[in-house]
Image: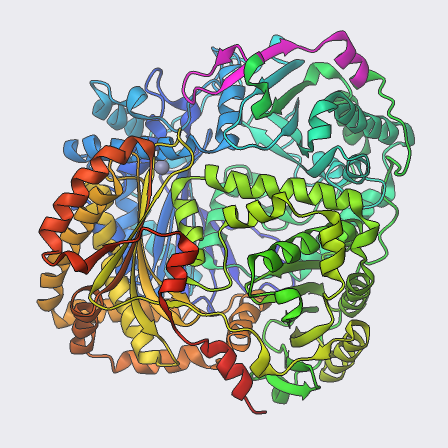
Amino acid sequence: MSTNIIKSQSDTRQYKHITLANKMQILMVSDPEADKSAASLDVKVGCSLDPKPLYGTAHFLEHMLFMGTEKYPSENEYTEFIKNNGGSDNAFTSLTDTNYYFDISNEAFAEALERFSHFFKKPLLGESSTEREMKAVDSEFNQSLQSDAWRYFAVMQENCNPEGLLNRFNCGNLESLKQDGIRDALLEFHKKWYSANIMKLCVVSNKSIDELETLVNELFNEVPNHDVVVPNLGEPAPLLPSDLGQLYKFVPVKDKDILNLYWVLPYSQLEHRSQPLKYFSNLFGHEGENSILSYLISEGLALELSSGYDHELWNFSCFYVDITLTRKGLENVERVIESVFTYAHNIKAKGVQDYIFDEIKRVGEINFTFADKSGPQRYALRLAGKMQTFEGDDLPYILQHSYIADVFDKPRIEQMLDLMLDYKNLNIFIRSKSLESICDREDRWYKTKYSRQSFSEEMIRIISSPNVPINKKQLDYPPPNNLLPKDLDVLEANQAHSARPILVQQWNETDLWYKKDDKFKRPKAIVEMKLYTNDCMFGRTAHARVFIEVWNNMLKETLREFNYTASMAELETTTSVYHDNVNFVWNGYNDSLPVFVVETLQRVKSFRVEDYKETFDQVKEKLLQEWHNFYLEQTYIQAYSNFENIIVSGAYEKRTLRNILENFTHEDLISVSKDWLKSGRTLWFVDGNISKDSAISLVEKAREILQIRPVDKEDLVDIRCIALPAQQTQLLEVPLQDKTNENSCLVSYFEVGLEANDIRKKLTHQVVMQYLDEPTFNQLRTIEQLGYVVFARSSSFRDVIGSRFIVQSPGQSCEYIVNSLNTLLNVQRQKVKELSDEDFKTQVDSVMTKIAEKDYNLNSEHSRLWGEISTHKYVFDRQEKEIEILKTLTKQQFQDHFEKTFFIDRKRLDYELTSEKHKEGQEEWKAKNLAAYYPNAEERVQVEVSLQTFKKQMSLHPDLFKASYASFKM
Ligand SMILES: [Zn+2]
């Protein structure tokens, strides 16, 4: 049966839905423009159906399906095939679903899909892989211990009805899975639940619908169907009446105080035309005039707020409001809760408003009409999941659902609001490190300390008849939004302006690049501007960096109401601080975009830090917290993102910034800001459905507002990357600050050197890293099980190319990992020497597939082109050039590059974040490694100084970006 799926007028793809003989439902999407194909298969079973007490079975099975099938028994066969053909793959397990997905080159799609189909026919679930892969699940659990979101969810789950299916341990670990008979349990689970009648498959490809239909019929018809019936997951009830009206307090890992309000409401997932909870997420999550957040901030009680809804177990819906509190907010948390309920009661008193629904509907319709395309993998993944709810009569709405709620179900909205005002439908969670002493319970798996009590009389009063004093801000409906776009015409094509970006005008201090869009044909545009400046020693000192970060955060806060209202009309703006520049982006419907840009800049220019003492205090508190919490992140996140601070000038560690900010006062800020935004240069790129004349007049207006005194390009500060000495390995060992985190992480960096527009060198390196990616994962993760996070990537810092191997391990020290990595590289050295021509070609082709990837929408095209402009390389036809060069790349060049990078010329830096637990093993393995790999002790140098000093001791590469900026002629 084929169904008429409603698609937007700008959507050129074809859709067809079929049901195979085995009852598997399949949605085929044919897109002749797709440069990659993708598939996603969703099984309507998740961890809520884990057999007790083998928690984690569904998730473990998900891992195991990647470990070989009867037809393709080799453990890494599938992933290797995907990676060798320019693709990627992954999977996830939720309470109700398990989803597998991949993308790959169009040419290899049929073969990949064939391999994929065996996951669901005859997986191997080999005994030895079962033993080992269990450790990957355990490592994954171990790393989730750093996540407060998981801890929050675990406390909630532990306190649900013990008989119900929400009371589960989703991830699983060795304790829950290392049981006799686990392999049988996996087989049993697969046999019972992996039934075609509860599977939904979505494929997206350049193939025609007919071709796809033949293909999926051939491959998936044999997936067994047991006509399994997914039981009602809401029986027994997941939450009993006694599980609600509860106040929880718990101790998080990160030092951040958060209030969560969690309402349990009637199931509304199937009401996709009206989506009653959308009305509330729109209001409660509002950050503009009259909103809860504006009120809380003006009272100094909160820093951030988010709100939304979800559906659980195909059984109930939940609505939540999450508020990040200030210290004052935590001390007065009842008042924060009372503010939320004052707002809710005010809404109730005024009644459900037509204009709010109309705005939601209007924006939704515009967004659907001009929806941007996303990549095939994301698209397949999203649709396969949705297919579980959009069946039969609902199927035609599957595409428009994410955008449009077009039926105004006022009584249902009113009913939901009444339920939200009843404390018996609510749980409240407060998390703060300061609550430790009052927490008398500990959850079973995460060992989170918490307490639980029924709402007090006072809490019930706060919820049922709240009354907070209204001073500066109202708690009310937002005013109507007059930024909604009116003119949605698309301009005539203009080949002269749309082929590539052109430098259309230069002023003393400003360069304007412009490109008109003729490809995506949406009434949208993007304006991006970089402000380079030496004001206040920016780019030269950590003090300056702290000042700019504070200034930028305060600016954001003062623009919040304005920006939020704009964002409701799909006009987005962000400001980011980089080492030597502040980057502004405006993105949205071109109709109101120029007004939006001008308005923002006027506010930026007239922003006086003197007038915002309270905002300063709040921003300071927030940044101190963020920079402190960074060291409580998962180890590999710390290692990965701190790495740049080690090797690039003008980049500073969070602890350095934090130390400065501790003593930074509002007076300091006022005094520094006097010299800020006075001189510099701006670099613009205006792109999209906008004429050249409008672009020029927009930038002229901006110049008038900003009044920036020009600085010569040659005088802008250089940002430079360190140059590692050849034939040497630097060892930079840093103890992990968080003593409770057991995971160590190694970043092993190999520098290649300046790219300097030597595209061939860069590409050769890319092919080498493409070649190493799979064996690294297979050896260090699948075989040795060093940890869940294992990857090898090429990197580029200020035009210096290199590669990073990253391994995070809960079980082994960094030096142990170094040993494994060195062994791996030695094995690969031999393999590279013996590499067949065919295998070499496979690697080159895979890189080609990745490079050839097209831009899916204006945003992805824009960021690619802006990358060329802002690094001052201007190779706009890079894709074509690179593919031509790749065609001529020889195996000898590849082999030489490998040998030079990892052996003969080796310039290596081992950055090791070592946990308390691994201290001992670390020393032992360090000695072993010295003996085994570094016969001359001077080949491995242990860095004994601070990072800043280390950076000073190293020579530096030139800043080629700035050099090219200065020498570029129109
Ligand atoms: Zn997993």
In magenta segment, residue 416: no
Q: How is the image coloured?
A: rainbow
Which x, y percent locates residue 649? 47, 64
Which x, y percent locates residue 636? 38, 45
Q: Can you see residue 913?
A: yes
In the displayed structure, 597 sits above or below 159; it is below
Residue at 42% x, 34% y is 738
Residue at 48% x, 23% y is 154
Instruction: Locate residue 243 relative to residue 405 in the image: left or right.
Output: left
* Quadrant containing ligand 1: top left
Q: Which residues are magenta?
A: 438-462
In this view, the residue in front, 230 or 430, is 430
Instruction: Locate residue 685 relative to residue 922 in the image: left or right.
Output: right
Which x, y percent locates residue 751? 30, 66
Residue at 24% x, 37% y is 812
In the rendered picture of this protein, how many numbered marks are placed on residues? 0
Q: Looking at the figure, which quarter contains the C terminus? A: bottom right
In this view, the residue in front, 459 or 730, is 730
Which x, y percent locates residue 624? 60, 42
Tell me which corner region of the image, top left, top right, bottom left or bottom right, holds residue 887. Answer: bottom left
Tell me which corner region of the image, top left, top right, bottom left or bottom right, holds residue 686. Answer: bottom right
Q: Can you see residue 568?
A: no
Instruction: Locate residue 767 relative to residue 857 in the image: left or right.
Output: left
In magenta segment, residue 441: yes
